[in-house]
Image (cartoon, grey):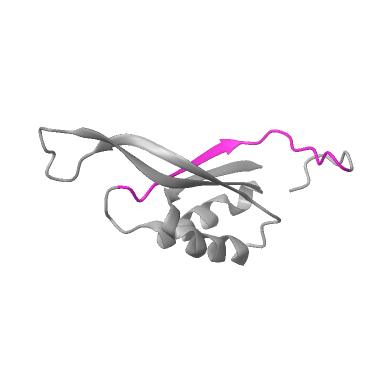
């Protein structure tokens, strides 16, 4: 299993939700965050400044065999080619325990 974390602009949430629902993922978390980073574009200006941008972080766990397809589709939805499109992090999820039932490794 893998844990997927997506950082992207807040305005992309509805498009992202539609894509995630298409893969029948049981549920996901959405957190409002503030990203702080360099604001620079292709012209690589000398006066680079830090900027705060409202973002969201979406998290869910999926089976290993679905990772590549899910990432490909999410990238298609979020990619504009402009600075600030976001990032996708893929991390191992060695174990998942449903607290209510004690069931292990059920996504």
82 displayed left or right of 1: left
Q: How many marks?
A: 0
Q: Position of residue 37 (x, y in %)?
A: 31, 34
Q: Nearer the viewer, residue 84 or 55?
A: 55
Q: Considering the image in quadrants, where does the N terminus appear?
A: top right
Q: Position of residue 96 (x, y in %)?
A: 75, 38
- Residue at 12%, 33% (x, y): give it: 47
- Boundaries of the magenta span: 84-100
Q: Position of residue 34 (x, y in %)?
A: 43, 39
33 displayed left or right of 30: left
Q: Position of residue 27 (x, y in %)?
A: 68, 54
Q: Is residue 56 magenta?
A: no
- Kindly report the secondary structure that dominates the magenta region of the rendered protein: loop
- Residue at 53%, 40% (x, y): give it: 90
Residue 100 versus residue 18 in the image, above or below: above
Q: Is residue 94 magenta?
A: yes
Q: Nearer the viewer, residue 38 or 106?
A: 38
């Amino acid at each position: 299993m893998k844990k997927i974390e997506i950082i992207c602009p807040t305005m992309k949430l509805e498009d992202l939700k539609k894509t995630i629902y298409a893969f029948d993922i049981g549920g996901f978390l959405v957190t409002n965050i503030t990203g702080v980073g360099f604001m620079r574009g292709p012209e690589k200006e000398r006066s680079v400044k830090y900027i705060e941008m409202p973002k969201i972080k979406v998290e869910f766990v999926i089976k290993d065999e679905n990772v590549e397809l899910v990432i490909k589709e999410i990238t298609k939805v979020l990619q504009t080619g402009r600075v600030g499109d976001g990032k996708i992090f893929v991390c191992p999820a060695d174990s998942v325990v449903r607290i209510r039932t004690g069931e292990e490794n059920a996504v």
